[in-house]
Amino acid sequence: MSTATAPFLEHLLAGQKIVAAEPAAWVNRLRAEALECAHQLALPTTRDEDWRFTDLSPLYRLAFRPAAAAARLDAAALAPFAVPEAAHRLVFVDGHFSAALSTPPAAGSAVAALPLAAALGPHGEVVHARLARIAEFREHAFRAVNTAYLHDGAFVLAPRNHGEAAPLHLLFVATQADATAQPRVLVVAEPGADLTVIEDYVSTHDGAHYTNAVTEIDVGANGRVRHVRLQRESRAAFHTATAAVRLDRDASYHAVSVAVGARISRLDHHVVHAAEGTFCSLDGLALLGGRQLADTHSFVDHAVPNTGGRQLHKTVVADGARAVFNGRVLVRPGAQGTNSAQESRNLLLSDRAQVDTKPQLEIFADDVKCSHGATVGQLEAEELFYLESRGIGGEAARNLLTYGFAAEIVGHIPVPSLVRALRETVLARTGAKE
Amino acid sequence: MIRDNAPVILDVRNLSAKVGGAEILRGISLTVRAGEVHAIMGPNGSGKSTFAKALAGHPAYEVTGGEALFEGRNLFEMRADERARAGFFLGFQYPVEIPGVANEQFLRLAYNTVQGARGKDELDPLEFDDFVREKMKFLDMDPRFLERSVNEGFSGGEKKRNEILQMALLEPRLAFLDETDSGLDIDALRIVANGVNRLLTPDNAVVLVTHYQRLLNYIVPDYVHVMERGRIVKTGGRDLALELESRGYDWVGAKAAA
Ligand SMILES: Nc1ncnc2c1ncn2[C@@H]1O[C@H](COP(=O)(O)OP(=O)(O)OP(=O)(O)O)[C@@H](O)[C@H]1O
Ligand SMILES: [Mg+2]
């Protein structure tokens, strides 16, 4: 282990001892193994190829402690984050489940949504078969740390052939400065189920804190999951996260992930096409200013024939901010008929703003259609002229186009109130006039 | 309607312009007075759209000679957005798609910007919504086109209707409509042409670029010009359009070259 990161890791793991043992022995074993891994794996530095552009040393210099049990939080403080379309929500305050603030479905409802610890009883087998198996932690320090803390988390289960119209809101609120949280989510859509999950990270203060999240999503045959991932934490926060998805036969997964908060954030988004006929769409937006850095590493694994994916990742980078995108697409030997399209589009709003974007296509089958493209630059000249020809000039035109560039991704979110709320955020950030 | 004493809106003299290094416009002159309808016809690639874009101020089109006065002001000393606010309107042959920007948001900003420049009142979102829906009725446009992104995924004809909607909102002094009729079905052509006719007053003017006589049955031109290789080679009345329809362009060019 590198000495520079050792004190940080020590603090990070200090609270692990106080996580109570679970009644299920396998969970305790899993945690012990993850703890062992966490101690052995080095935390990444810019010397690691995967972290070349994302320097976590500002995080490693800090000595954050694990957040103490749920600080008291007034429900009114959550009003700005309300999603009216969501019939149910689970709220986690500094990583701890808050029963008082949550509105889970009643026991016996079609869709189950409950804290992970509580799910181990009624849904033990479902959890055991998937937890920490979709997001592999043995080679990945941050996932190992998160897994070592396994206790609180969200478990969502949509039963066979059940279509749930209302989205489910998982709200992770950071209220304490200088604290760490280890949110964990497991979403299971059984065969034929259809579900929308909003995974939402927010802060109620402007200070620094650290979130290290792991989300696993298992979509059964013919199932469909729509996943909205919002990282709108304090601009002084640190955020590392994995979202790992497994698709069974003919299943589909549609993700829109938006990063507007955090000083440094990193999302590893992995999708495994584990069976034929699967499709995924990954839309991403990072809207950055000041000294923010947002890094998205996606990895779409076409493991079998006849799977499809499309991806549109956009960044808008102002001031001295920096965006990183690495889009890995793996077409394994024999995965004929793979159809994949990836696009990375980046808008730089200042001379100091920076973007590092890299497609990483690894194709080991010949009968495939894989495209990728990346643009880094300014606004589209034809779009600008169109606005000018209508009298809209200068800054107003540039602001409107910048807004539109970002709002396109927001518009893909299947929850109207979030679209409206995030458009407001984009308007405020791009200076466009409503 | 031709009135000899009507004020001149646009006066183009001997305009030449380059695009992508090539000289496309080679000495165009055109005078448009208030109340007039002009049609410009001519083969593909003759420079009609280039003419329109050079007048509108597209940055890729470099004016290399001649001048253009718009209500007495030198057009080429104004930025594109200033020309628009001064009352020059270009109806695009290929309207541009702007993903992420709602059509209504765009229309309102354009409307309020131009209103503001004219010292008139701007409308708030609710007032504008009522206002634009009224205008859309005349063009038989579904209000759903307000929520969608500007021109994104619109059919060819829907884009053209959206251009005329913008013309209706901005009430320009001069509308230069570049092939507004292409892509319109028979009913839409009638609706759009009626829309343009309603907007015509003795104080404004329109220049129609078209390939087809059909549009000119609805919007009757006072003048028909034929463009070829960057020049206006012939000007006549509405009958010229009929003659072109039956005889093609060859004879015009032959005569001009002679
Ligand atoms: N950006 C450009 N770069 C190079 N050449 C151009 C550019 N834009 C136009 N041209 C050329 O200028 C010429 C005139 O084009 P223009 O679009 O003005 O013709 P048009 O009369 O409008 O034709 P159509 O009837 O087909 O619309 C064409 O030969 C065209 O290829
Ligand atoms: Mg043309």
Image (cartoon, coloured by chain):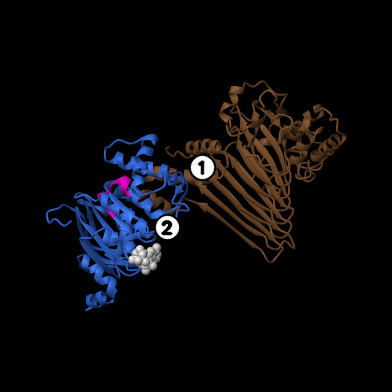
User: In this view, which residue lies farthest toward the right?
Assistant: A25
Residue range of the region highlighted in magenta in the rendering: B167-175
| Residue A116 found in image quarter | top right
| Residue A113 found in image quarter | top right
Left or right of A81, for residue A25: right
Q: Which residue is mark 1?
A: A318
Q: Which residue is mark 2?
A: B156
Disc 1 packing (10 Å; few <14; some 14–19; many ≥20): many
How many numbered callouts? 2
Three-letter amino acid code at the position of disc 2: Gly
User: In this view, which residue lies farthest toward the left?
Assistant: B5
Q: In the rendering, at what x and y percent does residue B195 appear? A: 30, 51
Quadrant location of the N terminus of chain A in the rendered image: top right
Three-letter amino acid code at the position of disc 1: Ala
Chain in blue colour: B
Chain in brown colour: A
Q: In the rendering, at what x and y percent does residue A122 appear? A: 80, 33
Ligand 2 lies in quarter:
bottom left
Tell me if residue B170 is in the magenta stretch.
yes
